[in-house]
Amino acid sequence: MKELMMAAVLALSPVSTPTTVKVYFSADQEIPGKVVAVERKAPHGGVARFAVEQLIKGPTQAEKRRGLHSELTGRIRGRSDCGADFQLKIRSGTATLRFCRTVWGSGVGGDARALHSIDATLRQFPSIKKVITLAKDGRCLFDETDAGTSCITGHE
């Protein structure tokens, strides 16, 4: 009965057209804040999740020839503790992105570029005012301080 009801809901739901989202890739090895937006067509309603997936996937070959890159591509490794690369929750204007696999850093500049790309990619959505990016262990991603909470508190 439950499957029949679900099938009815899916059958009656309007077919959604793809939504264009932006993915912000790094454009310079030296300047952590320099990102360039590229467009992708999200095939489903989970546009924020799709945008982060595309950030992890990285730029197309044509975009790479333009000098764009993602600090996340190829740096997410190991076993997932949630069945995916990440979890994304959006509540009261705050997007909390927690990686479920280990994210390997690439040094201070690369780590800053990764965080800036994530922030820019998620803040394109009007409902997101703040982004918190967490590592698999729940600490702020790339935060090596004792507390590991600088992305939450804004203090190191």
Image: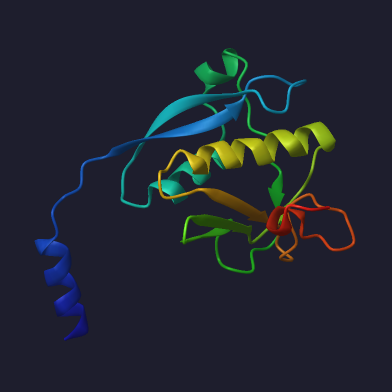
Q: Is residue 27 above or below residue 152?
A: above
**Residue 72 can be seen, yes or no:** no
The quarter of the image holding the N terminus is bottom left
Q: Is residue 130 above or below residue 2?
A: above
In the image, what residue occupies the spot 47% across and 49% down? 128
In the image, what residue occupies the spot 69% across and 58% down? 152
**Residue 14 can be seen, yes or no:** yes
Q: Nearer the viewer, residue 19 or 11?
A: 19
x, y percent for residue 144: 87, 53
Residue 28, quarter of the rendered image: top right
x, y percent for residue 96: 57, 58
Q: Is residue 10 above or below residue 131?
A: below
In the image, what residue occupies the spot 41% across and 28% down? 39
Here the colouring is rainbow
Label count reads: 0
- Residue sitting farthest toward the right: 146
x, y percent for residue 99: 64, 57
Q: Is residue 35 above or below residue 130?
A: above
Q: Nearer the viewer, residue 129 or 145?
A: 129
- Residue sitting farthest toward the top: 66
x, y percent for residue 54: 50, 39
As drawn, is 106 to the left or to the right of 67?
right
Residue 153, quarter of the rendered image: bottom right
Residue 6, quarter of the rendered image: bottom left
- Residue sitting farthest toward the bottom: 1
In the image, what residue occupies the spot 84% across and 63% down? 147
As drawn, is 41 to the left or to the right of 105?
left
